[in-house]
Image (cartoon, helix red, strand yellow):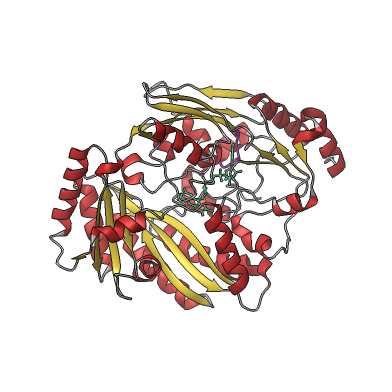
């Protein structure tokens, strides 16, 4: 029999002390959603089951005790750190869930400039680690737009990626080792080594688990030398996304490693580059960085490739540098965006997918055309490619719509989910992945079997093995 809300709170207080258990009703209601149903918080209209409590986790041992208790009692737990999730990973799918908030675990344990790695607790904001690394002339190389607000635990749990990924990789390329706690209370530390071939790479069971398998308590990531003075910026306007994808592909398959490589379609370019790009212009841009010789050679190589495309018109590199300097979203921008939505009911959302070079252009065009034709009240439909690889790239659809004829709580069902459905369908049809970096959350969980195909067996077996009672973040990755 499931515990009552009162019994859950009492049990938690008994384990960690009442001072670490938050039961304020307003906090609980706001914690029932994340950015997936952000209109519910913006307009203060809530429909999701209310969590029983938020526990402010202070240590690995406390996390282990809490998980063991929740597992025995069958209480759903939702791990949380920075709370910037966009896909419903933090949403309480069932009543009386318990949120395990790791943000108090915010100690930078070690910055090791000899072995070029830093170890932090899960609640360290990425910005804090980056600031510490910069004091030593180093960088994490990780720069998601949410860098000022996201924490290392969540960044690892979602397989996040940053704006300089083409050079440094995604978080999966940066994690050296980590510590995680499983629902039976087992604490596992995966040691820090440059590489090993002692069986499968078990880091990948934890990286990207979205709180559906375990609670991450500590992370060790790589550090890199920081050379801001040798940054080089390059940009072009052009009329065709097809040409843009061709140029982008040629740069990547020729072996160049710019830190930033992006292609914007006209709609999305209009939001950032209207001071130099015409309404029907796409924008192709790059940033090269690293030791001066490498940065120079990278920029020269890219220049030589794009020079062979007569359709591309070069723009002043200062435009690209200015854009680059304003990329991250701290609390100020997030609050201002919420206020804009409150005033206008015009909502901006994004969905990111990936595919090989042969399919990405078709997926982009097919999804864009269908969304414009099938979804009402769209005020802007666009997108950009922002993370490229030797064998393909991503597409980050960026769209705005007016919420008309429904309440804010129905925005997801009338607009967001139908849009995601189109994007997922068009991507899966052509063999791409429906999630490039925001995680499955609960928003894209309904497509998990289509995403994995025959390899779903492996994913499902991990869930059964590590979380046999199904208490870890119900509905995330694995639909209820
Ligand atoms: C303005 C904005 C810009 C963004 N830009 C980017 C971007 O450039 N690149 C990118 O990849 N993402 C981006 N995101 C998405 C988001 O920031 C990332 O998914 C980030 O990794 C989440 O980190 P967090 O600490 O906020 O995690 P949370 O939001 O707290 O949690 C995210 C997910 O991870 C799980 N989780 C959290 N902590 C733990 C833990 N300790 N152990 C196990 N599971 C845990 C949660 O249950 C949830 O499913 C952006 C979001 C916003 C709002």
Q: Which residues are magenta?
A: 209-215
Instruction: Say which quadrant the N terminus sits in.
Output: top right
Give left or right: position of 92 versus 414. right
Magenta region includes residue 266: no
Q: What residue do we see at 72% from left, 38% from top?
A: 55
231 lies left or right of 327: left
Q: Is residue 210 magenta?
A: yes
- Which is more toward the observer, 75 or 146? 146
What residue appears at the point 70 percent right and 31 percent down from the top-left corner? Answer: 67
Residue 395: % across, % down: 39, 58
Residue occupying the point 40% across, 64% down? 383
Q: Position of residue 182 (x, y in %)?
A: 63, 30
Q: Identify which residue, 41 or 438, lies in the foreground.
A: 41
**Magenta region, main secondary structure:** loop
Quadrant for residue 170, please give it.
top left
Say whether residue 58 is visible: yes
In the figure, 433 relative to 193: above or below? below
User: At which x and y percent is residue 285?
Assistant: 28, 57
Whether residue 444 is visible here, answered yes or no, is: no
């Amino acid at each position: 029999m499931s515990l009552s809300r009162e019994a859950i709170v009492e049990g938690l207080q008994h384990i960690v002390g009442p001072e670490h258990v938050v039961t304020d009703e307003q906090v609980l209601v706001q914690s029932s959603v994340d950015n997936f149903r952000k209109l519910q918080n913006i307009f203060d209209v809530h429909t999701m089951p209310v969590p029983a409590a938020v526990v402010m986790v202070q240590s690995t041992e406390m996390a282990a005790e809490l998980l063991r208790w929740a597992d025995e009692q069958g209480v759903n737990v939702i791990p949380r750190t920075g709370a910037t999730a966009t896909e419903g990973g933090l949403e309480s799918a069932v009543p009386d869930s318990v949120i395990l908030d790791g943000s108090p675990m915010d100690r930078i344990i070690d910055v090791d400039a000899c072995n070029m790695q830093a170890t932090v607790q899960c609640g360290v904001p990425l910005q804090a680690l980056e600031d510490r690394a910069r004091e030593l002339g180093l960088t994490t190389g990780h720069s998601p737009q949410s860098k000022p607000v996201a924490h290392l635990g969540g960044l690892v749990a979602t397989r996040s990626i940053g704006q300089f990924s083409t050079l440094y990789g995604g978080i999966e390329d940066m994690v050296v080792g980590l510590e995680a706690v499983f629902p039976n209370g087992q604490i596992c530390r995966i040691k820090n080594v440059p590489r090993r071939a002692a069986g499968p790479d078990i880091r990948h069971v934890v990286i990207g688990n979205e709180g559906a398998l375990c609670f991450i308590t500590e992370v060790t990531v790589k550090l890199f030398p920081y050379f801001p003075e040798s940054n080089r910026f390059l940009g072009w306007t052009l009329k065709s996304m097809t040409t843009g994808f061709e140029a982008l592909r040629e740069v990547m398959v020729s072996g160049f490693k710019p830190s930033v490589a992006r292609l914007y379609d006209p709609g999305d370019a209009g939001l950032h580059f209207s001071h130099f790009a015409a309404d029907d212009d796409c924008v192709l841009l790059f940033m090269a960085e690293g030791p001066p010789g490498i940065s120079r050679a990278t920029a020269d190589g890219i220049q030589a490739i794009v020079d062979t495309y007569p359709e591309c018109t070069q723009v002043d590199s200062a435009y690209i540098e200015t854009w680059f300097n304003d990329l991250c979203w701290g609390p100020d921008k997030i609050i201002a965006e919420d206020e804009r939505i409150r005033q206008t009911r015009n909502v901006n959302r994004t969905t990111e997918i990936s595919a090989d070079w042969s399919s990405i252009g078709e997926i982009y065009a097919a999804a864009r055309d269908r969304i414009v034709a099938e979804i009402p009240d769209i005020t802007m439909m666009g997108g950009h490619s922002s993370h490229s690889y030797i064998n393909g790239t991503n597409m980050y659809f960026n769209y705005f719509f007016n919420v008309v004829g429904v309440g804010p709580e129905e925005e997801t069902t009338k607009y967001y989910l139908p849009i995601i459905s189109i994007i997922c369908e068009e991507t899966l049809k052509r063999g791409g992945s429906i999630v490039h970096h925001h995680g499955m959350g609960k928003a894209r969980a309904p497509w998990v079997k289509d995403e994995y195909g025959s390899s779903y067996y492996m994913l499902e077996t991990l869930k059964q093995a590590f979380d046999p009672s199904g208490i870890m973040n119900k509905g995330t990755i694995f639909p209820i």
